[in-house]
Image (cartoon, rainbow, N blue to C red):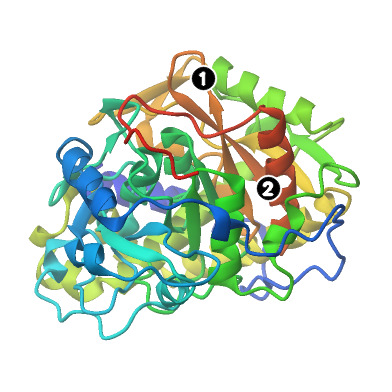
């Protein structure tokens, strides 16, 4: 997309938001506040460290597997070979090998954020909060993972460090922008990984790679030490191959008052589930709709909810992220734009030109839409919808046909993820095996701070065999569990 094309698109979206009187005068600051109602939990307290009994492979074996598969997958930008000498720590993640998206600070390592412009930066002086918590809990950090430059993309096709390839089909993308983290988990190279999610950057690669990926409620997990893309959107979120490991990692990085692992044995009793309809269900491929329908049926979703003005929510998300993302890197964009990946540069340059009136109009709409949508979820703990409208596209694929309409790839991939993260809702992509052999992601969305309900639902689905990590052709032979 050229700068002129990107600018014209942002101008059209800005005008649509600027000229509508329904949110004129609203304070342009949506409130991401806890829901005071408790999420129902049934069953034994599973908060005792579930993973302490999980067998772990020696660090040397982990690094050998990475060395074997890295040339094919390109999941890592740095591999920490000194991890082979590390003494396994104690704690809920004791000995768990994990990786971190290369925009989250790791002490002593340069945080690249997918950019050659940052290669000469000083190494990080400390771990990001989430990384430090993982290490303190006994996790073994083995590498930093590839990503779209500055997190502005859905495919991890990085022109500087190369594309990350999907373990299920090396000709296909792994998703983005946290594609390296998802591919590393899916290939069995690590048991868990951290990514960041703005408009779908955890959920989309989780869907394409056939694993679990959670965007926590906005504000639940500290973002300190992360190179943010759009500060009013970004969250740090985990990937894992099982619901139990995902919940255990979330317990560590979020440090909640009540452990999320306590929700895993509750079953579906008391959970209220609905499926999305309208724009958050239609225009997906038949195999995706079939998978989402099976998940909704298994959860007993009797009702459907059609959220209004979804198209405007996408437009506002695009305007805000373009403006905030460009602001993060404005000096680089003005002084050395040639250093920025062409897939990213033109959209960022267009973002530099977003007028304050359009940015504030988008934020006012955001506050208005949050106030409109949250009451629609009053009687719902879990809303079911697709994660992505299709399975993983090919590397360098410019367009995708969905529902008889051909659209640019980027316009298709975020259509189901952008609206819900736009207002801070938690969202979990769960894996389903697709008929073509490629995995499909189904999204479970909750009310603010209702992350535990999503994990409860996912655990019940996993136990019944409706969902589960999809084993790719390229994977280390040993299981983590």
Q: Is residue 396 left or right of residue 265?
A: left
Q: In this view, does 169 lie above or below 204?
A: above
**Callout 1: few (<14), some (14-19), or many (20+) C-alpha neighbours within 10 Å?**
some
Sequence-earlier tag: 1 or 2: 1
Residue 22 visible in image: no
Location of residue 65 (image quadrant)? top left
Q: In this view, does 167 lie above or below 337?
A: above
Q: Name the residue under label 1.
A: 434
Q: Which mark is residue 42?
A: none
The x, y position of residue 315, in whole percent, is 51, 49
Q: In this view, does 2 lie above or below 99?
A: above
Residue at screen point 64% across, 56% down: 426
The nearer-to-camera label among 1 and 2 is: 1
Classify the position of the N terminus by image quarter: top left
- The one nearer the camera, 466 or 179, is 466
Residue at screen point 69% across, 43% down: 459
- The one nearer the camera, 215 or 185, is 185
Measure how far apart labels 1 and 2 are at the Cα level. Answer: 21 Å
The x, y position of residue 233, in whole percent, is 51, 64
Residue 165 visible in image: yes
The x, y position of residue 36, in whole percent, is 84, 71
Q: Name the residue under label 2.
A: 445
- The one nearer the camera, 345 or 46, is 46
The x, y position of residue 302, in whole percent, is 87, 30
């Amino acid at each position: 997309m050229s700068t002129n094309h990107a600018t014209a698109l942002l101008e059209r979206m800005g005008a649509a938001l600027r000229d509508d009187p329904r949110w004129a005068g609203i304070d342009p600051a949506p409130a991401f506040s806890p829901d005071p109602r408790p999420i129902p939990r049934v069953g034994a307290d599973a908060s005792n460290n579930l993973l302490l009994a999980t067998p772990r492979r020696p660090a040397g074996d982990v690094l050998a597997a990475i060395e074997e598969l890295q040339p094919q997958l390109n999941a890592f930008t740095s591999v920490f070979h000194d991890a082979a000498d590390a003494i396994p720590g104690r704690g809920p993640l004791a000995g768990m090998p994990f990786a971190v998206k290369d925009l989250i600070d790791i002490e002593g390592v340069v945080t690249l954020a997918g950019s050659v412009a940052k290669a000469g930066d000083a190494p990080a002086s400390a771990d990001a909060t989430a990384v430090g918590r993982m290490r303190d809990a006994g996790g073994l950090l083995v590498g930093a993972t590839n990503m779209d430059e500055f997190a502005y993309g859905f495919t991890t096709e990085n022109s500087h460090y190369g594309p990350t390839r999907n373990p299920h089909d090396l000709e296909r993308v792994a998703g983005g922008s946290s594609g390296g983290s998802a591919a590393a988990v899916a290939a069995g190279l690590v048991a868990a990984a951290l990514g960041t999610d703005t408009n779908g950057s955890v959920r989309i690669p989780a869907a394409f790679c056939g694993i679990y990926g959670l965007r926590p409620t906005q504000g639940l997990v500290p973002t300190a030490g992360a190179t943010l893309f759009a500060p009013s959107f970004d969250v740090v979120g985990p990937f894992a191959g099982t619901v139990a490991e995902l919940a255990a990692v979330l317990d560590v990085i979020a440090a909640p008052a009540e452990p999320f692992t306590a929700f895993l044995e509750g079953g579906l009793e008391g959970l209220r589930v609905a499926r999305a309809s309208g724009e958050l269900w239609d225009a997906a491929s038949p195999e995706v709709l079939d998978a989402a329908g099976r998940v909704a049926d298994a959860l007993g979703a009797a009702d459907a909810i059609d959220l209004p003005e979804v198209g405007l929510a996408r437009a506002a998300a695009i305007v805000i992220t373009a403006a905030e993302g460009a602001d993060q890197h404005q000096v680089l964009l003005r002084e050395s734009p040639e250093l920025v990946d062409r897939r990213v540069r033109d959209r960022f340059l267009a973002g530099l030109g977003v007028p304050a009136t359009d940015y504030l109009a988008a934020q006012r709409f955001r506050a208005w839409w949050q106030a409109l949508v949250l009451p629609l979820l009053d009687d719902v703990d879990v809303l079911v919808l697709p994660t992505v409208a299709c399975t993983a596209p090919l590397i360098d694929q410019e367009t995708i046909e969905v529902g008889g309409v051909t659209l640019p790839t980027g316009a298709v991939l975020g259509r189901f993820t952008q609206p819900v993260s736009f207002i801070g809702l938690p969202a979990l992509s769960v894996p389903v095996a697709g008929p073509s052999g490629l995995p499909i992601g189904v999204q479970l969305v909750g009310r603010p701070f209702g992350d535990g309900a999503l994990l409860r639902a996912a655990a019940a689905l996993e136990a019944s065999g409706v969902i589960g990590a999809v084993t790719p052709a390229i994977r280390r032979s040993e299981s983590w569990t």
